[in-house]
Amino acid sequence: MSPLDRVLSYVDDSAEQMIADLLPVLRQPSISATGEGIRECAEMLARLLTDEGIEAQIVETAGHPVVVGRTADVVDAPRLLVYGHYDVQPADPLEDWATPPFEPTIRDGRIYGRGSGDNKGQFFAQLMGYRAWRAVAGNAPINLTFVLDGEEECGSEHLPDFARANPDLVAADVAYLSDGPVDDSGSYRVVLGVRGILALELRTSGASRDYHSGHLGNLLPNPAWELVEALHTMRASDGRILIDGFFDGVQEPDAATRDAVAALPIDLPAFFRDHGVDRLAPLPEAGFHERLMFQPTLNISGLQAGYAGQGSKTIIPNTAVARLDIRLVVDQDPADIYRKVCRHLERHAPGVTVRQLGGGVRPSRTPVNHPAVDLIRDAVERATGETPLVLPSTGGTLPDYVFTEIAGLPLVKVPYANADEANHAPNENLELARFVSGVRIAAAVYDAMARFT
């Protein structure tokens, strides 16, 4: 029996204890939006890493701290940086939880609790993969650095500064993380990129207060109409984004990336049925997966103007506000796109003011043909008996660029959570079988990456 086979056997035999050891971590609140429990959770994780034989430290930032752990050195072995985040979303609305969010509960083969899937359960699986190697072989066959972020759920605002200030702590050969769900089909995914994000607020103002729409209609400017007309200048009805220079520098995917996308499954009727729609959003000349991976978005996430309550209130509102989020693809920069949005509105809607919300997150993508990709894909197959899907990117946003751009590392992600994990929602959960499988995958990845050159 190979060392990895013995490690995988240990994982299966020890799964019940590993699940029990996860419960205290889930029980500890760590809500980055409010700061509740963040310091206590960071200290708990530092103790936990130390108990697993890992040298741990809490690194302060201008926001919430980063917890870093480094394993005992394996001479001449590569170093894998394992990223995760210990902060969680607020649990509201509490009344929609079947059991309290910070009292983890096991039922029907799942563990329910805030952070179970996003992301405590997943990074804990990475740690348990190391425990298994240490128990069986005394150490993993690779050097590991664990970087646990306390601000991912509010944009990882200070993680870039952490990486720039501590280049020795993010020095590695490859970065690896597990966040998000498996494919809707149940297949595991090897994910190589994310879109970036820029969040904006657009605001228009009119009279000093709301006015009667009959008495002063056609005389007073209506900020709601001005805002609607401004938005219409930014996107055509066929989905094309009309902001000058928006696509400058965006590169078409290479042949290997296109081939990987072509191999991905899609069941459009099931997609429509599951999401209660009968069509896709308008967008010219783009397939299903290409829309998520290679096309930016211009999304209206909120609109507010006037009165929309019961009955009718005939007013000319004095303000109108829109919230936008723009998902960015590789070679787009949030700061550059923000400037272009401002110039566009100055030209087409000078009465609209623009405010950036947060610092923005850059997109990231690791090449499909990077040698780490095959090693990790084979490790997932070894651990699960299934061939995973390879996704050049997903539509969401994570701070991957901190590692791919600032630290200069290739980054590969393998999500462990079930597709219906309900992350960010009430009754967040993680299938116990998925957790154990995640531990097996982590152990196999550590084995495979020891051969990385």
Image: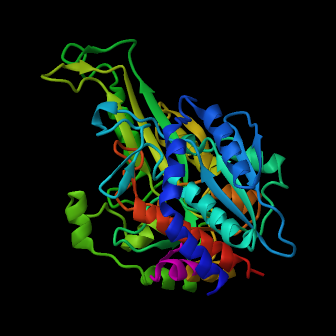
From the viewer's side, name the closer residue of 265 and 252.
Answer: 265
Q: Residue 176: where, in percent of width, then height?
A: 64, 65
- The residue drawn where x is 21% and y is 59% is 277
In the rendered image, residue 436, in percent from the top left (x then y), is placed at 48, 65
Q: Residue furthest left?
A: 311
- In the picture provided, is 121 more to the left or to the right than 453? left
Residue 437: in magenta span: no
How many numbered discs, if any?
0
| Quadrant that contains the C terminus | bottom right
**As drawn, 321 above or below 328:** above
List x then y, in percent, for residue 296.
Answer: 49, 60
- In this rendering, position of residue 426 left or right of residue 272: right
> In the image, is residue 124 above or below residue 447?
above
Q: Is residue 146 visible?
A: yes
- Front-most of 230 and 49? 49
Q: Is residue 387 magenta?
A: yes
Q: Residue at x 70, y 38 (%)?
A: 65
- Does residue 248 appear in the picture of this structure? no
Magenta region: 379-394
Q: Residue at x 46, y 53 (%)?
A: 117
Q: Nearer the viewer, residue 346 or 96?
A: 96
Q: In which quadrant of the rendered image does the N terminus lie?
A: bottom right
* 135 relative to 87 in the view: left or right: right
The location of residue 353, given as percent across then percent down, is 51, 31
Q: What colouring does the structure picture have?
A: rainbow
Residue located at (36% from left, 19% from top): 318
Q: Quadrant of residue 254?
A: bottom right
